[in-house]
């Protein structure tokens, strides 16, 4: 099961799942969380057709990663046919794993569309601000367009990232707007505004091992809810 959701894969690893992480974001946040340096990235596949199995880099016994590179920014205008022609390469690789997690860029470009084409379940994080709402409409258009070419697609869900970038009154207003627009597609639980989410990049530790507080418990509850939707409610 794969999707545009950067769930903390270390919690999956503890359950002994074989996991593949794909970093489609040229900002390379996911890649930097695991590795200091990389030699090959998804750029080599996009630019030189380097085989994906040569790009996959093991992180642990259970976690493999396809890293990103800032050079992938030069590939954000490739067209739809390019995605369709190369989808089978990814699908062939996916057969080796029980879970595939894809981290997409926050913009609607070729790379995020590739993520939609490869996913069967999509999680859309939202900030309570007008720009995020405007981007949501375009994201949903993209999902509706590309899912017609993706027979594996199941559904999407949106979640609120409570990171505070706006005044409380604006956040509350936007939250009500999201609830009205998305209805049951908006998860009731949100990602809390928690410094540990940022600190984990510096420490490279699992936040569930670093902290025992309400914020971590909320994050764990959110992930358990998402897992239930994907694996139990859908019978997948």
Image: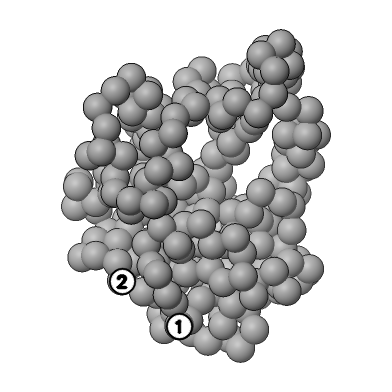
Front-lying residue, 79 or 87: 79
Image position of 235 (left or right of 26) = left
For mark 2, what is the residue? 58
Q: What residue do we see at 69% from left, 23% from top?
A: 166
Residue 147 showing in the rendered view = no
Q: Residues within 10 Å of mark 2 (few under 14, many from 20)?
A: few
Q: What residue do we see at 49% from left, 45% from top?
A: 5
Which of the two labelled residues, at mark 1 and mark 2, occupies the earlier sequence position? 1
In the rendering, at what x and y percent does residue 177 appear?
74, 17
Q: Residues within 10 Å of mark 1 (few under 14, many from 20)?
A: few
In the rendering, at what x and y percent does residue 91 appear?
48, 67
In the rendering, at what x and y percent does residue 229 appear?
42, 30
Front-lying residue, 153 or 23: 23
Picture layout, residue 60 above or below residue 15: below
Image quadrant in which the C terminus is located: top left
SS state under label 2:
strand
Picture layout, residue 129 above or below residue 203: above
Q: What residue do we see at 20% from left, 46% from top?
A: 15
Rendering quarter of residue 212: top left
Image position of 228 (left or right of 3) = left
Q: What residue do we see at 37% from left, 62% from top?
A: 34
Q: Which mark is residue 98?
A: none
The answer to whether mark 1 and mark 2 are in CB contact below 8 A is: no
Front-lying residue, 188 or 203: 203
How many numbered circles does the render carry?
2
SS state under label 1:
loop
Q: Which mark is residue 39?
A: 1
Front-lying residue, 183 or 61: 61
Image position of 74 (left or right of 185) = right
């Amino acid at each position: 099961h794969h999707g545009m959701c950067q769930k903390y894969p270390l919690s999956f690893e503890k359950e002994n799942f074989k996991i593949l992480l794909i970093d489609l974001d040229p900002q390379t946040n996911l890649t930097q969380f695991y590795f200091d340096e990389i030699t090959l990235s998804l750029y080599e596949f996009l630019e030189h057709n380097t085989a994906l199995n040569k790009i996959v880099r093991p992180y642990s016994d259970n976690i493999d990663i396809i890293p990103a590179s800032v050079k992938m920014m030069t590939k954000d205008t490739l067209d739809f046919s390019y995605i369709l022609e190369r989808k089978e390469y990814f699908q062939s690789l996916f057969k080796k794993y029980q879970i595939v997690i894809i981290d997409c860029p926050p913009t609607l470009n070729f790379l995020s569309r590739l993520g939609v084409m490869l996913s069967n379940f999509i999680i859309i994080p939202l900030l309570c601000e007008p720009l995020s709402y405007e981007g949501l409409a375009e994201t949903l258009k993209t999902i509706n367009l590309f899912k017609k070419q993706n027979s594996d697609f199941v559904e999407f869900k949106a979640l609120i990232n409570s990171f505070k970038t706006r005044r409380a009154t604006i956040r509350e207003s936007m939250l009500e707007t999201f609830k009205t627009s998305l209805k049951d597609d908006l998860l009731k639980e949100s990602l809390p505004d928690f410094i540990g989410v940022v600190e984990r990049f510096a420490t490279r530790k699992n936040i569930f091992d670093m902290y025992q507080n309400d914020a971590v418990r909320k994050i764990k509850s959110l992930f358990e809810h998402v897992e239930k939707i994907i694996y139990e409610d859908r019978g997948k």
